[in-house]
Amino acid sequence: MKNIEIALVMGDGSAPEMMRVACKIAKIAAVIDGINIQFIKTPMGWGAYQKYGDTLPKKSLEKAMEIGIVFFGAVGDPALDNTIGVEKPEMKPETKVLLALRSQMGLLLNFRPVVYYKELAHLAQVRPERIPEQGIRQIWLRFLLQDSYFGSEDLREQIPPEVRERIGLWRKNVVTGDQLIVSDIAYYTRKVVEKYFRAAFSHARLMKLPLIVIDKANIMARYVFWRKIAERIGKKEFPDVPLSFQYVDAANALLFDPVKLQGVIACGNEHGDILSDGAVAAMGSMGLMCSSAINPDNGKAMFEAGSGTAPTLAGKNIANPLGRILTAAMMLRHIGAPKGAGAIETAVREVLSNGSRTADLFSAKRGDADSIGLGTKEIGELVLDRVLRQR
């Protein structure tokens, strides 16, 4: 049996409930491939603050960097953001924790798969007839660095203080709403964009899917740059991969006709964040979102479902753990446990196909009158049972 350590961030709100379910399933599924997962707790978020006085304790960050693989439960809580976070805005975990991990680990590639199955078409927020018999496969590939989320900090020291003030380049913790001008910097560098698109084309080729590039090249210079690099790399290095372009506003409208976005969908940081959330909601529920963030140079990775912390559901055994469970499958594939990953994915599909639902998926209006409404633990046990049958 091969031992593999994974840094575990249980997270805030209802995330720990979902992570306990997902971790149990991941450990058992990994055994199928002869791997023993050892989860190493690395506290981060508001829960860590209450114990250590920091949402990103130094020891936790050091351990996560040392291990290089993080299973991340989600951090944040509006109640604490609006109390402690007002007094100490630098502690807000969505910024301090997430941006630090992404930047320091070099997590450029954010994979967010959205798969429509015909037998689950009634769960979708789009018309079932828009989903073909063979289903729909969308792989949203978000560019996780640079862009508007990192630009102001990455380039701050290159701009003289008097110029920062003149153009309104304020750190967000000092913004009051009374400033005369506030700005953010969004940028791309050629080397990193080229690396991203080579990875995007390679994945599209591997998956036998077209590459769809999202941009706003009709308005923004950085997206002219983005599009030209994609065109050049596609033409010279990946002529066999079908390539097309969509403006971000047009892509937003196509979320309601998902077959037109079947492919690997290359998005900038901000656009990818927004559109992929919409795509998962259109598929059925944010509770189904799974996600991986990868450093293509050294394999460091963070696996984080996109459904957040749902703090109002904490302790109620209500939150949907399936996104965390599917994220665990992505993690298993990354560490060399493809059979276990496949077992999880098959189990989740079978459980949903058999009519089991968490509250966010349950709707009699959508044909679920005969379905079974289950809690976090209960649907996790059903998935686990299906995984065990495949061992």
Image (cartoon, rainbow, N blue to C red):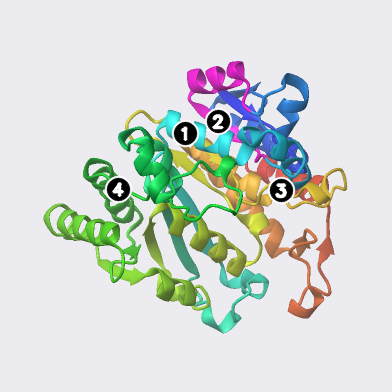
Residue annotated with mark 4 = 188
Q: Is residue 328 left or right of residue 201?
A: right
Is the C terminus in the top left, top right, bottom left or bottom right quadrant? top right
* Residue 1 visible to the viewer: no
Q: Amino acid at mark 2?
A: Val
Among all residues in the image, which is located at the extreme right?
316
Q: Amino acid at mark 4?
A: Tyr
Residue positioned 49% across, 22% down in the render = 65
Q: Does the CB distance between marks 2 and 3 fall below 8 Å?
A: no
Residue 264, located in which quarter of the rendered image?
bottom left
Q: Is residue 44 above or below residue 133?
A: above
Residue annotated with mark 1 = 301
Callout 1: SS: strand
Residue 259 on the magenta span? no
Q: Residues within 10 Å of mark 1 (few under 14, many from 20)?
A: many
Between the C-alphas of marks 2 and 3, the distance is 18 Å
Q: Does the CB distance between marks 4 and 3 fall below 8 Å?
A: no
Percent coordinates x, y for residue 108 in the rendering: 38, 41
